[in-house]
Amino acid sequence: MPTPSPEIIHLLSVFAVAMTAPTFAKSLVLIYGTILTPGIRTVSAVLRVMGLGDLETFGNYHRVLNRDRWSPWVMSQLLLALLIRVFIPDGASLILLIDETLERRQGKRIAYKGRFRDAVRSTVHQVVTCLGIRWCCVALL
């Protein structure tokens, strides 16, 4: 398995506190493989590039984002702090652009679903709500 540079290891180690140790180990494999994979970057392609294509626990890597233990809230706080430290000079203004989108999802295993206003299907006179996950995207300007 290829070894990443010390700079990448140091950068990614910041995010270890948001995950359990097994989840962090699997996510590192997926991140390194994503960097090395040419073309379409699926989990299967990433694992093949990393030499793990014949692994018996191949399916465990597919569950990193949806079932493994990690905190998206802690992860987003760490990422924002890192971006501010790297890209915003001292004394400069912080400008955030926030957008939200609705991913229409249903099912018993989807934990964070709720009923939200659907901006695409709503009109001035009629508000339509849909079951799904509301994603908030934040851009740092």
Image: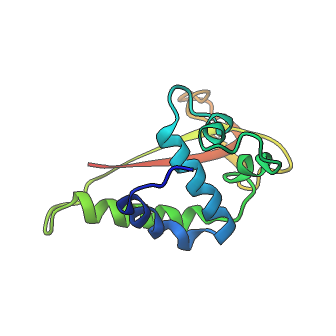
- Where residue 23 sits, quadrant-wise, is bottom right
Residue in view at x 83 percent, y 48 percent: 56
Is 96 placed above or below 16 here?
above
Q: Which residue occupies the foreground of this view, 22 or 84?
A: 22
User: Residue 73's spot in the image, x, y percent?
Assistant: 55, 65
Q: Residue furthest right?
A: 108
User: Residue 58's spot in the image, x, y percent?
Assistant: 77, 46
Judged left or right of residue 71, residue 113 is right
Judged left or right of residue 25, residue 75 is left
The answer to whether residue 16 shows anywhere in this view is yes
Instruction: Give the color scheme: rainbow, by chain, secondary structure or one colour.
Output: rainbow
User: Residue 14's spot in the image, x, y percent?
Assistant: 45, 69
Q: Which residue occupies the foreground of this view, 118 or 85?
A: 85
Q: Residue furthest bottom?
A: 17
Judged left or right of residue 41, residue 63 is right
Residue in view at x 52 percent, y 41 percent: 34
Judged left or right of residue 44, residue 134 is left
